[in-house]
């Protein structure tokens, strides 16, 4: 499977912002265990998928918010 971009710029921006916020909250101790671990995982996944522009769940569900290629 080729990793084609399947997120548009707004989707990517939201994911990056959400990832940074969740990781900052987890690092600052604003969240307690077991939610702390979930915040680290979800924050990291959101940040990575936002930076890369590819979401594996979108690929599985055949969803794409990226503009159509010509």
Image: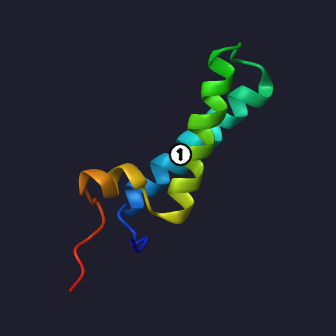
Left or right: 47, with 69 as reference point: right
Residue 62, percent from left and from top: 24, 57
Residue 1, percent from left and from top: 39, 71
Task: Please tell me in which quadrant of the rendered image residue 66 appears.
Answer: bottom left
Left or right: 31, with 38 as reference point: right
Q: Is residue 32 above or below residue 59?
A: above
Q: Is residue 15 above or below residue 3?
A: above
What residue is shown at x 68% (from left), y 17% (from top)? 31
What residue is shown at x 28% (from left), y 59% (from top)? 65
What residue is shown at x 62% (from left), y 36% (from top)? 41
Residue for badge 1:
46
What residue is shown at x 25% (from left), y 55% (from top)? 63
Residue 24, percent from left and from top: 71, 34
Residue 43, percent from left and from top: 60, 38
Left or right: 67, with 22 as reference point: left
Q: Is residue 31 above or below residue 10?
A: above
Question: 29 or 54: which is nearer to us?
Answer: 54
Determine the residue located farthest toward the front in the rendered image: 1
* Secondary structure at numbered mark 1: helix
Task: Please tell me in which quadrant of the rendered image residue 6 appears.
Answer: bottom left
């Amino acid at each position: 499977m080729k990793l084609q971009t399947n997120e548009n710029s707004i989707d990517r921006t939201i994911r990056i912002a959400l990832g940074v916020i969740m990781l900052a909250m987890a690092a600052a101790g604003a969240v307690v265990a077991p939610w702390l671990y979930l915040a680290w995982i979800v924050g990291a996944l959101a940040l990575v998928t936002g930076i890369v522009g590819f979401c594996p769940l979108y690929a599985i569900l055949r969803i794409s918010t990226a503009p159509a290629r010509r």
